[in-house]
Amino acid sequence: MSEELRGRMGTTCACHKHREMVPIEIHHIWPLGMDGSDTKENKVSLCANAHGAIHGYLDLLLKHEGRVPWFKARVYGRVVRAYAMLGYINSRPK
């Protein structure tokens, strides 16, 4: 089983700082399900909380056509919103 599927522990998360080891997951910035590529440039290491938050905010971006009301957006961190926006922008038809 590959390291990505087995899961790994670490303190490196692109969104949050961790002092102790936490589960680290690989996130595709431009999701594979939205025709994103499985390349190194399209991957980022995240803790499980950040990974879930990015997908949650991406869902809101899709629901609100890229214009999430601030009262909903403000509960997500700046970096979480930025990664979700990158996925959203890349998934839009050119």
Image (spheres, rainbow, N blue to C red):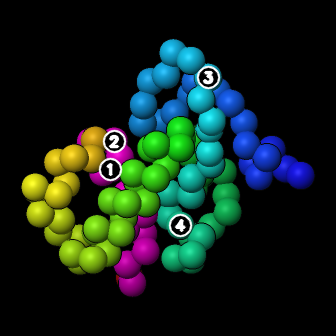
What's the residue type where badge 4 is placed?
Pro
Residues at circles 3 and 1 in contact by the CB criterion of under 8 Å: no
- Kindly identify the residue that appears in the image at 43 percent across and 74 percent down: 91
What number is the disc on residue 21? 3
- Kindly identify the residue that appears in the image at 62 percent across and 38 percent down: 24
Mark 1 secondary-structure assignment: helix
First in sequence, mark 2 or 3: give its number: 3
Q: Is residue 50 above or below residue 58?
A: above
What's the residue type where badge 3 is placed?
Met
Label 2 packing within 10 angstroms: few (<14), some (14-19), many (20+)? some
The residue beneath circle 1 is 82
User: Foreground: 22 or 66?
Assistant: 22
The residue beneath circle 2 is 79
Distance of label 2 from label 1 (alpha carbons): 5 Å
What's the residue type where badge 2 is placed?
Val
Quarter location, residue 3: top right
The residue beneath circle 4 is 31
